[in-house]
Image (cartoon, coloured by chain):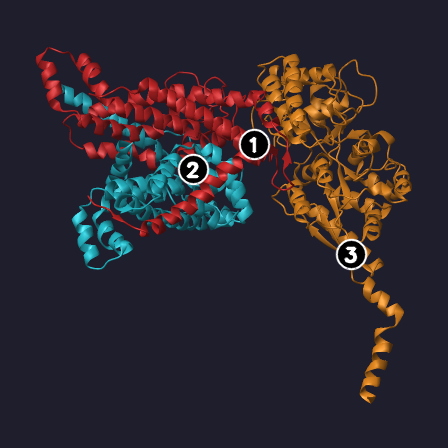
Chain colours: A red, B orange, C cyan
Amino acid sequence: MSRVESKAGYFMVMPYFVYFAAFVAYPLFFSFILIFHRWNIVTPMEFIGLKNFVRLFRDELFFKAIINTLIFLSIHIPLQIVIALFFANLLNKQIKFRAFFRALYFLPVVVSGVVITILWQQIYAYETGLINQMLLGLGFKKIPWLVSPEIAMPSIAVMATWKNVGFYIVLFLAGLQSIPNELYEVAEIDGASNFQKFFRITLPLLNPTVVLVVVLSTIGGFSLFIEPYILTGGGPLDSTLSAMLYIYNQAFYFNHMGYAATLGFFFAMVILIIVIIQRKFIEREVY
Amino acid sequence: MKSFLFLFILFFVFGCSSDRKNAFNQANKKLTYWCAPNPEEIELAKILVDKWNRLHPEIQVEVQALPAGQSSEEVLLAAIAGGTTPDVCSNIWPGAIAEYIKAGGLVALDEFEDFDSLISARKIPVDLLESFRSKDGHFYQLPWKTNPVMLLYNVKIFEKAGIERAPRTYSEFFEACEKIKELGIFPGYTDIRPIWWQRFFDFYPFYIASSGGRTFFKGDDLDIDYEIAVKVFDFFRTCFKMKYFPITNFQVDPFLSEKIAMRFTGPWTITYLEGNKPSGFEYDFAPIPVPDDYQGKVYTYGDPKNIAIFSTTRYKREAWEFVKFLVSEYSDSLLLEICNQLPIRGDLLENKKFADYFNRNLKMKIFAEQAPFTRGVDEVVEMKEVFDAISREFEACAVYGAKSPDEAVKNLIKRTKVIIEWSK
Amino acid sequence: MRRNALTYITLVIGAIFFAYPFLWMFFASLKPETQISELWFMSENLSFKNYSTVFAKIPIVRAFFNSLFVSTAITFSVIIFGSIVGYALSRLNFKGRDLILFLILFTMMIPFQITLIPTYVLIVKLGFVDSYAGLIFPAMMNSLAILIFRQFFLTIPQSLIESARIDGCNNLQILFKIIIPLSKPAVATVGILTFTSSWNEVLWPLIVVRSEKFMTMPQLVTIFVVGGQAGSQLGVQLASATLLALPIIVAYVFFQRYFIESLARTGLKE
């Protein structure tokens, strides 16, 4: 393939360069300035050196927010993988209406998180919620889904799984369909059980997809904002306070632009480190 | 040449008359005045400005209401930064003034030579006045009005429960709660949402009530009374634990529908209650309960709003004259009549000018008696976040019982210190 | 045969699990307040009263058009600029080419948490708060879109491009007259991805827009429900949520194959 040396290339790429300068480079650069200042946007910036970092390391609420997010992920990710694999497996079989089921499972993925959250607020409501109504009807007691500090975050994790699992079902389905049938046939001839077939063939070959699911879910989990914002405002007892919600409040409720930028910066570092660690631990060579 | 002379004479006669010239220039003096966005205060402002304009044709005042639906504090701060401030504003909340001063937006009022005589004419108690003095020793706000938070109770329910008079101490309060509980009604209520300003109607008034008027800060440093804070947290924790207070948000007003017997609120509720009460409904007010061993005057949170002059004003003297008019006996009596809010003066019940009003509005008498014994919030920039921290501890300790009052206060002090250290 | 039955049953249960909440939401919005928590859809007293309340209380139609305008503008911009840059990176040779590619990959790595606040400050300084510009400009280009186009364009046979050049076409003409028509899957993927994600985006509008005039649809519904304007009328809240879901669901019903394939394709790309 020959490529012609072309000045036109510069011009075509120029718009991206301008965009990059304005919305990537400048914000990054400015964030490095902001984190050493205190600023409420209205009055002039005040240089405060490392005070933002001093405060960050003594900020119990912020660390609680990060731990909340980790709790969320520790439930959301495994649940997602198990359910997505389960349904992808079913859909992989010779069945009719596969497209119909796939489309239905995928529906919550495209609908706005705002809709999902408002809907689940009614599902989880303590007095009149759908689930509790069903429980009462079956003779059980009501469960304080969003009112109990212990259960609130796991409840949100389940809701997030419901919303996103369709996407991962599709991914796993594509992954499953790319596994050559011969591998299974050979294994059957060798007398492998279903269990062995799954863990020796399917899972390892699905590894790239699993890594993808984990990384995407992690990044999504760290962005958790609108769900606690609508459902609980961060409560009860700050158990559903996500890092993004805390940063948002610091920036736009208390007008602490510098401190919020510092929190954002630190949080971004945490995300990068976790993603790198995940890749190291979960990624395996696929033969 | 003749026409030129003619014009010259015309100009001299009509243009250079010194009286007319002064009147012309003076009529150019215009002041802008911003008032709070609620309907009663807007009406009050219009009447006062109207009267002033008729009395002072050379200094015309134009009144504008602050935008509703937005935090007045943010609007004012943005105006200071943008140089678009009015000359005078009467919706100054002491908690926000620290930021205005830091931005250099306000005029020091005690530099006017008749400041002191104005204050003494209003007979403002010294300790209350001092709470409005800024850190550099000057007064940037003129105390204007107050709405003390007190205990509101249903008189009929008290009678039915056999409670003779409004509870004055924590023990009396709990006794009353036990009796009311037997009637199947929730004795009391406070909004449990951890929103920072909610604490102005539970934790803060109770703290001030038994602290002898002490607030949270001395200057820039935290000066919270540990014992009192623990007692207040413990009080509310008992209320929720013993189910005297419900952990619900009510859809319909629970006081008028007799689902609760008591709550903590200010005189603004009177208009609402009078307008909506079912027939035969009787209510009254009492001071905030204090710990059993407390001796001394019962204070409370007064939600004061004050008047300030902004440093962008071109007519300092005239603005000050207008401000003096805003706190004259005439204006104060209108503040009572139209807004049912109390001017910050010590002679409310002695001054004959207000006697008629208080005779017609007996319930306001209690508030007038309480008015000299109120406090606002400290002049600290991060007051909002401090109250946010209080709300978190309140939720954890009082509402959920997940922490002991000691832990709550210790944690509150710790987090407040972090916030204050950072903001210095 | 039996195993298949079990599979079908499970799939149907799954289908109910994913679809029932939406159906319930729609019918609950039609019910009187006291019957909302009932599990079954039907009730004698169905009415659209809650919807009239929503239309009366908030400018939801305007918000719909705001979202439509903003998302369409962003999608067009991302497709046009994405394909231009993707073309330059895949088919042209110039000195900065690898640098730009690196910058694009670098941008994708940066978590948005770090640029969120400074970008807001930039928008304030530019005076774009409460404006369409503030909503559109920061999203005008997208690294992923560029990479998708680049990937796709690499597969276009060089001969086609050569012959177009011989015919005297310049680069832009080559791109838009020849390459794009051949790249329908890429355009569809980028288009659907961009439109859906910009339509559902709510954090950025919450930050940048305070005036109801410019609010996007998800933002307006969020503020309506959280800010207490809906009072405690659950039916009204659910009605607003249904209205919000409607446009995407309608689009989904017609284009679901493209939705699913686009999103799946991006997953595989990673």
Judged from the image, the secondary structure of the residue bearing numbered disc 2 is helix
**Which label sits in the foreground, 2 or 1?**
1
Q: Give x and y (percent) for residue A75.
A: 38, 19
Chain letter, disc 1 residue: A
- Residue A275 occupies which quadrant of the picture? top left
Callout 1 touching callout 3 (CB < 8 Å): no
Furthest residue toward bottom: B2
| Camera-side residue of B382 and B119 | B382
Measuring from the top left, give residue A192's x and y in whole percent.
13, 11
Disc 1 is placed on an element classified as loop
Quadrant including the C terminus of chain B? top right
Q: Nearer the viewer, residue A44 or A222?
A: A44
The residue wearing badge 3 is: B50
Q: Residue at x 26, y 29 (%)?
A: A171
**Mark 1 surroundings within 10 Å by alpha-carbon count, few (fewer than 14), some (14 through 19), many (20 or more):** many
Circle 3: element type: helix
Q: Which residue corresponds to mark 1?
A: A35
**Disc 1 versus disc 3: nearer the observer:** 1
Which residue position is annotated with label 2?
Answer: C238
Q: CA distance from mark 2 to mark 1?
A: 41 Å
Asked whether the residues under marks 2 and 1 belong to the same chain, the reply is no
Residue C23 on image: x %, y %? 33, 35
Chain under disc 3: B
* Dot 3 alpha-carbon crowd within 10 angstroms: few under 14, some 14 to 19, many 20 or more: some
Evaluate if marks 3 and 2 touch, with contact meaning CB atoms under 8 Å apart: no
Residue B394 seen in the current view:
yes
Task: Say which amino acid is labelled 1.
Answer: Ile
Q: Position of residue B334 (x, y in %)?
A: 80, 47
Q: Residues within 10 Å of mark 2 (few under 14, many from 20)?
A: many
Instruction: For the N terminus of chain B, give its image quadrant.
Output: bottom right
